[in-house]
Amino acid sequence: MVTIGLLHTTIRGDEKLILEAAKKRNVKVKLIDVREEIFNPKNYKIDFDLALERCVSTVKGMQATRFFESLNVPVINSSAVAAICEDKFITSLILQKAKVSTPEFALVFNTKQALKAVEQMGGFPIVIKPPLGSWGRLLAKVNDIDALEAILEHKDVLGSPWQKAYYLQKYVKKPGRDIRAFVIDGKTICAIYRHSPHWITNTARGGIASNFPVTNELSKLAKKASDAVGGGILSLDIFETDHGLEINEINHTTEFKNSERPTGVSISGTIIDYCIGKVKKL
Ligand SMILES: Nc1ncnc2c1ncn2[C@@H]1O[C@H](COP(=O)(O)OP(=O)(O)O)[C@@H](O)[C@H]1O
Ligand SMILES: [Mg+2]
């Protein structure tokens, strides 16, 4: 019998779906609340075949992943994949290097260079994001120099060291939506549109999900992007542009609970099947 160690913090609806899917497949799940663990390799007993990292906290998830990998436990997603996906600048660099279509971006550390970077990218509006962030938090669409200076000064004076690395991205005019593709082992199993009257379309910010019938163009681009970051269980944020689809960012601990119904695909079931397949190959 396969046993999966589920590394978690708060159990969300997504983890509940994963637990149900595991039960249906007769897979044993050991719940590991990383907040309560003592990660001392000298005393740690491993009684599961593979770990599935589902922590809400990126930092806790990453440290737990590195701990189990050091004990030769396979973790999905691997720390190598997580290290790329948790940082938007690194993701962009990897996508660019792999020639995967992605919006133009730059990283700068001061306002003077930010202004020059904006010029290089064709001018305002521009989007500024914390390189490490999610749920559409602390994103700024900046329309002019005054706003750019104000945002950067606030980050500089009030922000943590990470807020002082300014990740800039060209603003992409979207048709009131973007696409979220669920990609497991390089295959796009389903995708949704996220509609919103606001330019930030995250469902965590009120975006509404509807089915996006997966196209060849999307599958091909998603496979290329997944290969570039090292594969595993991923969700990709994708923009529709005049010159085709562009990958905005890649998430390595994907939230999917609102996407099973519109797509009719058991994302949780596919996650468990992927884990079973991995264990069988060990
Ligand atoms: N460059 C951009 N142009 C237009 N819209 C953007 C841009 N970047 C982000 N957005 C919008 O904001 C949302 C959140 O941005 P994203 O980069 O995915 O950060 P997060 O990690 O917070 O989800 C995207 O899904 C999209 O709707
Ligand atoms: Mg996103």
Image (cartoon, rainbow, N blue to C red):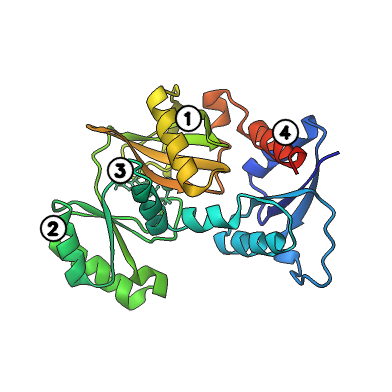
Q: Earlier in the sequence, mark 2 or mark 4?
A: 4
Picture coordinates of residue 239 (x, y %)? 33, 37
Q: CA distance from mark 3 to mark 4?
A: 34 Å
**211 or 107: nearer the eye?**
107
Q: Nearer the viewer, mark 3 or mark 4?
A: 4
Q: Is residue 47 above or below residue 269?
A: below
Number of residues whose C-alpha sits closer than 10 Å to that of mark 2, classed few (under 14), some (14–19) or many (20 or more): few
The answer as to whether callout 2 falls within 8 Å of ligand 1 is: no
Q: CA distance from mark 3 to mark 1?
A: 19 Å
Number of residues whose C-alpha sits closer than 10 Å to that of mark 4, classed few (under 14), some (14–19) or many (20 or more): many
The answer as to whether callout 3 falls within 8 Å of ligand 1 is: yes
Q: Earlier in the sequence, mark 4 or mark 1?
A: 4
Q: Nearer the viewer, mark 2 or mark 4?
A: 2
Left or right placement of residue 223 versus residue 119 in this view: right
Please give the residue where the numbered disc 3 appears in the rendered image: 199
Q: What amino acid is found at the position of numbered circle 4 in the picture?
A: Ala
Picture coordinates of residue 148 (x, y %)? 20, 63
**101 or 239: nearer the eye?**
101
Q: What amino acid is found at the position of numbered circle 3 in the picture?
A: Trp
Which residue: 21% across, 65% down?
A: 114
Please give the residue where the numbered disc 4 appears in the rendered image: 21
On residue 191, the disc is 1
Are the two marked residues, 4 and 1, in contact with CB atoms closer than 8 angstroms?
no
Q: Earlier in the sequence, mark 2 or mark 3?
A: 2
Q: Earlier in the sequence, mark 3 or mark 4?
A: 4
Q: CA distance from mark 2 to mark 1?
A: 34 Å
Residue 264 found in image quarter = top right
Q: CA distance from mark 2 to mark 3?
A: 22 Å
Q: What amino acid is found at the position of numbered circle 2 in the picture?
A: Glu
